[in-house]
Amino acid sequence: MKSMIKICLISALLISFAYPAVAENLCGERVDIIDTLKKRYQEVPVSMGLAGNGGVVEIFVSIKGSWTILVTRPTGVACVVSAGEAWESLKGPGEIDQGV
């Protein structure tokens, strides 16, 4: 049992060191990332907003359901912070059911 816990802790430690390296590879020029999202995944922007730190948050979606969240920092560096599949759009703020 102790060896299993030790393995889990070591794995978690290694992953925590590897994560920043992966994140760095997902950052670059905004136009280059957007171009890749459009050409490789057929994703286009569907939503955007301003984060508390001044970054611009954008959501890109394809008709196949793939999605990507891109954050562009005030410095101009853009980073993919998450991506996935099975995107489903919900009602927008003006379309919320008020429960007549």
Image (spheres, grey):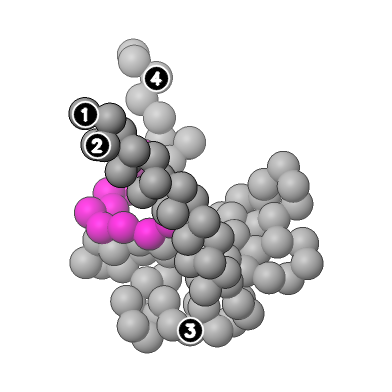
Which label's residue is closer to the chain start, 4 or 3?
3
For badge 2, the amino acid type reads Met
Q: Position of residue 64 (x, y in %)?
A: 21, 67
Which label's residue is closer to the chain start, 2 or 3?
2
SS for callout 4: loop
Name the mark on residue 98: 4
Name the mark on residue 1: 1
Q: State which mark lies toward you, 2 or 3.
A: 2
Q: Between marks 4 and 3, how big is the CA–CA gap?
A: 39 Å
Which label's residue is closer to the chain start, 3 or 1?
1
Residue for badge 2: 4
Which label's residue is closer to the chain start, 2 or 4?
2
Front-most of 33 and 4? 4
Residue for badge 3: 35
Seen in the picture, residue 85 relative to 11 is either above or below; the reply is below
Q: Which residues are magenta?
A: 82-91
Q: Between marks 3 and 1, how big is the CA–CA gap?
A: 49 Å
SS for callout 2: helix
Query: Mark 4 and mark 2 in contact (Cβ < 8 Å)?
Result: no
Front-most of 20 and 14? 14
Q: Between marks 1 and 4, how big is the CA–CA gap?
A: 54 Å
For badge 3, the amino acid type reads Asp
Q: Residue, x 65% and y 64% (percent of image)?
A: 72
The N terminus is located in which quarter? top left
Residue 92 belongs to magenta span: no
Query: Mark 1 and mark 2 in contact (Cβ < 8 Å)?
Result: yes
- Relative to 61, is 49 on the left or the right? right
Which label's residue is closer to the chain start, 1 or 4?
1
Q: Is residue 52 visible?
A: yes
